[in-house]
């Protein structure tokens, strides 16, 4: 009897299972910084740091601090005002007092009474005195407006602004007239401190100039200057009276350039 001998089947090779993740060896290389691995498509470069912008001061406030406030332009001008002769000083004080009472300082500058230092002989002695160049007039520095006009007109002894009318404001003095007037006052003030010194203020006209008489019997007439009498502060003017030329002597303030 024959035995059937079966050939044993080969045993398949068994592949060991992979070790668990915890069992895998750790990498020893140091990790590469994240910034060295830019994202796909982004160019590599140094890291961009964004700092908060410093708060800038407001432009208008900075300019306001850097730019000093501009002074308000002055509208004051010099004018001539007719007043009662012999009361110039009292009228000046009254106007200045009313300006303070009514709060009009912003429209008011100053008042000047032009004078000169002269020397006269009295009883054989030299006597120095101040003489008004234009008796009956004040030189005022003001901003001409209704409030100033009302203040002057309501002050006792004040006439009106020279050259003005109801419908026309008065013309201000020219720069040349102002410079001459103020320069004469400075010279006169310096003369007070020097004994025996006499300062004469020359008029705005000279021999050959055409002038107009503004005060006295011949007011309104015109003539030619023939001679200046600086020692007396007067001028000789040739007028035509009844068809004949006649020389008449006036004080400086009684005539003006025509």
Image: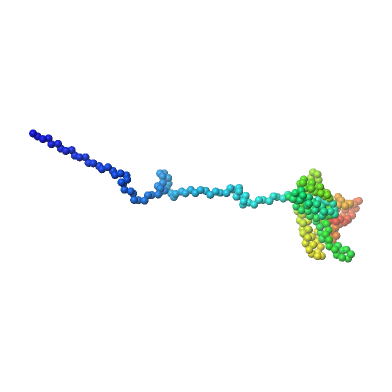
Q: Which quadrant, please, contains the N terminus?
A: top left
Q: Is residue 60 visible?
A: yes
Farthest residue, direction top: 1
- Is residue 20 found left or right of 111 in the rendered image? left
In the image shown, does 152 or 209 lie closer to the viewer? 152
In the foreground, 199 or 246: 199
Q: In x, y percent, where is residue 218?
A: 88, 51
The spot of residue 231 in percent (x, y) is 84, 61
Of 253 and 235, nearer the camera is: 253
Residue depicted at 82% across the width and 52% down the height: 91
Could you tell me which residue is drawn at 76 percent across and 48 percent down? 102
Residue 68, image x, y percentages = 64, 52
Badge count: 0
Q: Residue at 42% of width from left, 45% of height from top? A: 42
Identity of the residue drawn at 77% across and 46% down:
147
- Outermost residue toward the left in this view: 1
Residue 155 image position (x, y, % from top left) = 81, 49
135 relative to 30 in the view: left or right: right
Colour mapping: rainbow
Residue 162 appears in the rendering = no
- Residue 251, quarter of picture: bottom right
């Amino acid at each position: 009897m024959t035995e059937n001998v079966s050939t044993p089947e080969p045993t398949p090779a068994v592949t060991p299972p992979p070790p668990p993740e915890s069992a895998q060896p750790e990498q020893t290389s140091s990790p590469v910084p994240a910034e060295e691995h830019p994202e796909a498509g982004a160019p590599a470069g140094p890291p961009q740091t964004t700092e908060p912008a410093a708060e800038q001061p407001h432009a208008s406030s900075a300019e306001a601090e850097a730019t000093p406030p501009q002074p308000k332009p002055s509208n004051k001008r010099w004018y001539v005002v007719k007043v009662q002769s012999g009361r110039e000083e009292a009228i000046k004080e009254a106007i200045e007092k009313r300006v303070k009472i009514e709060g009009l300082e912003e429209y008011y500058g100053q008042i000047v009474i032009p004078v000169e230092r002269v020397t006269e002989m009295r009883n054989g002695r030299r006597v120095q005195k101040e003489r008004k160049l234009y008796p009956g007039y004040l030189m005022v520095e003001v901003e001409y407006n209704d409030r100033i006009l009302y203040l002057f007109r309501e002050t006792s002894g004040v006439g009106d602004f020279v050259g003005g009318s109801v419908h026309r404001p008065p013309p201000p003095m020219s720069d040349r007239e102002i410079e001459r007037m103020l320069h004469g006052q400075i010279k006169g003030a310096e003369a007070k401190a020097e004994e025996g010194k006499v300062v004469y203020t020359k008029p705005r006209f000279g021999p050959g100039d055409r002038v107009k008489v503004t005060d006295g019997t011949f007011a309104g007439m015109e003539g030619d200057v023939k001679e200046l009498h600086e020692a007396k502060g007067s001028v000789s003017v040739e007028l035509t009276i009844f068809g004949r030329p006649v020389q008449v002597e006036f004080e400086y303030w009684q005539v003006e350039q025509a």
